Image (cartoon, helix red, strand yellow):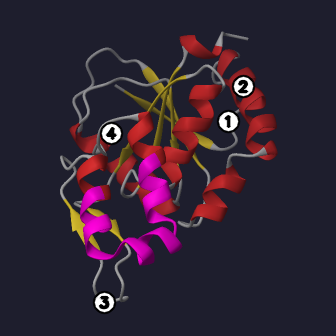
Amino acid sequence: MPAPNSINVAVICSSNMNRSMEAHAFLSKKGFNVKSFGTGDKVKLPGNAPDRPNIYDFGTSYDEIYNDLLAKDKQYYTQNGLLHMLDRNRRIKPRPERFQLSKDKFDILITCEERVYDQVIECMESRTQEENQPAHLINIDIQDNHEEATLANSEDLDNDIDELLHEFESKFSRTILHTVLFY
């Protein structure tokens, strides 16, 4: 089986805030060369009312978002866990990144919901193939809340990641959960 750090992995959710960042931290600790992304037009976080989300551009740093929410309502955003999540995120990387703008190449792309999976396929199909390098796309449906993001990266993923890498090593032998795309 290849060493984890020889495989380039992308983890992708909608806003590059919760699910992809939790998986990014988890896979980094396992020794993988990992990056995380979002596919949405904007970064969206819950506001203090359902009809008033906090919306940011992908270029906005986690520090800026953290300080903005801190200034808006420290108690509320501490209580709902957003400040804790943003604190974790800013220790991992400076800002959320949009997958569609990335020029990086990956061996494995892991999406966190079917809609994001479809957006990644659409993006990959619109790109010009340069090197005919295969990339495996895997979808793991994870609800967008802290508890589900954390549980999804627990024992099941720990066990499954070894199996997925073994499958990747034996190249296209048996595809169960993924689509092969090309760069």
| Front disc: 1 or 2 | 2
The answer to which image quadrant residue 90 occupies is top left
Q: Position of residue 144 (x, y in %)?
A: 53, 66
Q: Tell me: residue 74, above or below residue 136.
A: below
Tell me the kind of residue under disc 1: Thr
Label 3's element? loop
Q: Are marks 2 and 3 in contact (CB under 8 Å)?
A: no
Is 24 placed left or right of 67 in the picture?
right
| Front disc: 2 or 3 | 3
Tell me the kind of residue under disc 2: Glu
Q: Quadrant of the N terminus?
A: top right
Mark 3 crowd level (few <14, some 14–19, many ≥20, 10 Å Cα): few
Q: Are marks 3 and 1 in contact (CB under 8 Å)?
A: no
- Return the residue at label 3: 51
- Return the residue at label 1: 175
Q: Are marks 1 and 2 in contact (CB under 8 Å)?
A: yes
Mark 4 crowd level (few <14, some 14–19, many ≥20, 10 Å Cα): some
Q: Which residues are magenta?
A: 67-87
Tell me the kind of residue under disc 3: Asp
